[in-house]
Image (tube, rainbow, N blue to C red):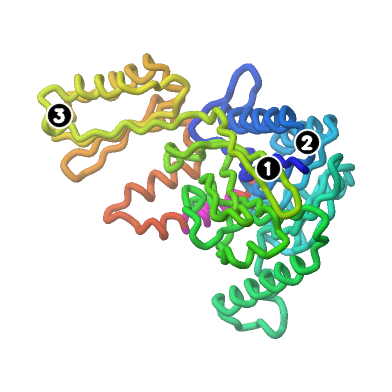
Amino acid sequence: MIKLLHLADLHIGVENYGRIDPSTGLHTRLLDYLDRLDEAISIGLSAEVDLVLIAGDIYKNRSPNPTHQREFARRLNRLRSAGVPVFILTGNHDISSSLGRAHSVEIFDALGIEGVTVSDRLRLHVIPTRSGPLQIIALPWVTRHSLMTRDEMRGASFAEIDFQVRRRIENFVVKTAASLDASIPAVLAFHGSVDGAQMGAERAITLGQDLVMARSVLAQPGIDYVAMGHIHKHQALGTVPPLVYPGSLDRVDFGERAEPKGCVIVELECGAARWQFHQLAARPFISIEKDVRGSSDPLDLVTTLISRHDLRQAVVRVEIQATREQAALLREEQIHALLEQAGAFVIAAVTITVERSSRRRYGAEPELIEGITPRRALEIYLNSKQPPLAPARTAALLAAADELIAEEKP
């Protein structure tokens, strides 16, 4: 039996809803993600796993800064010092947006670190572990660059290019699965979307266009487990073999506030796989929403609502609907003080909607400077547009902004 720790969507470098920690000089949200990664690694080491499989998206963007690279390298060193090999599949946040440029985790392959495998192309790997070899069919995030530059594809529509990319991936999977050694456990590692999966906040931060694969293609005979990444919501889409998204390690924004975050321990044998989700102590995101227009004392009602939540160490937002008269009684500094007294880690926003016109209020000026990134400021602006933008349009604009931000960073 071979044991795996299945992780995905580490997103080291997410720095929204936080501030600089004076004791370390690091952003508190960076520390959140590193703490969750440490927690997942501890779970894996306690379970005596034979290999750690990371199904893509190590960093938040394609150009991680040296601090983010250093912190990830420290976690790799911890695993290798324990004798555990690591398999890294490249995701859409890892690959370069330009053909020929190195991707964000290529350095670990270039250094030739023993026991660390980086897979950035369609390929079958056989990884030695202390419990025996493991076959891994690698399906990293696939770009359209190489196909679009071929003479026969010049002038082809995006739909035709997508069809050709999908067809080539499907042919690779079917052919490779048929060639597997039946005496060795086999995993298919895939970073991308699968038909029927429940999408989440990853839509807003996706770099590149999704290529959705059919479950029937991934669930080939001979494959014991499908280790997936890219979608932040933990879910399983099949049983024979299991097709599992472990989900992201921590919450990116309020769209993920109800989702448990964690990692997966897998026990593999030829023809069988058992897996278990382990929830991690992700930072809570709490949204307090109320229409107070029928209340004679709106501030007292808001105070009661706040008292009903455990806000300790949470990222909190308050969204209130009120009349113009009530809005005059809802002083921002009072609500802010109530949230601070309740132990809120970050006050993301206080929004008071007054008779169809929105007025957004945020925390004190230092909070605004340190807690809201340019991307978050754009998100707030887009969400305030009247008439409202279509969700797909908002997601596309935010994805384009992420591309620009990634290219601007050194």
Name which residue type carries label 3. Gln
- Residue on which disc 2 sits: 76
**Which of label 1 and label 3 is nearer to you?**
1
Identity of the residue furthest to the top in this view:
341
Magenta stretch in the rendered image: 396-405
Residue 266: which numbered mark, if any? 1
Q: CA distance from mark 3 to mark 2?
A: 54 Å
In the rendered structure, the answer to whether residue 323 lies left or right of residue 99 reads: left
SS for callout 2: helix
Residue marked by disc 3: 326
Q: Residues within 10 Å of mark 1 (few under 14, many from 20)?
A: many
Front one among 233 and 375: 233
Q: Residue at 61% of width from left, 33% of height from top?
A: 33
Q: Is residue 206 above or below residue 163?
A: above
Q: Residue at point 38% right, 27% down?
A: 363
Quadrant, the C terminus: top right
Among the two numbered marks 1 and 3 on one chain, the one whose residue lies closer to the N terminus: 1
Q: Amino acid at mark 2?
A: Leu
Looking at the picture, tell me which residue is in the foreground, 36 or 277.
Answer: 277
Q: Is residue 66 above or below residue 219?
A: above
Q: Position of residue 104 (x, y in %)?
A: 73, 49
Q: Is 253 situated above or below 221?
A: above
Q: Where is residue 290 shown, x and y percent of the image?
A: 24, 33
Instruction: Give the label, 2 or 1, closer to the camera.
Output: 1
Residue 338: within the magenta?
no
Query: Residue drawn 75% across and 55% down?
Result: 186
Q: Quadrant of residue 73?
A: top right
Identify residue type, mark 1: Val
In this orientation, does residue 174 appear?
Answer: yes
Left or right for 38, reference 193? right
- Residue 1 lies in what quarter of the image? top right
Circle 1 SS class = strand
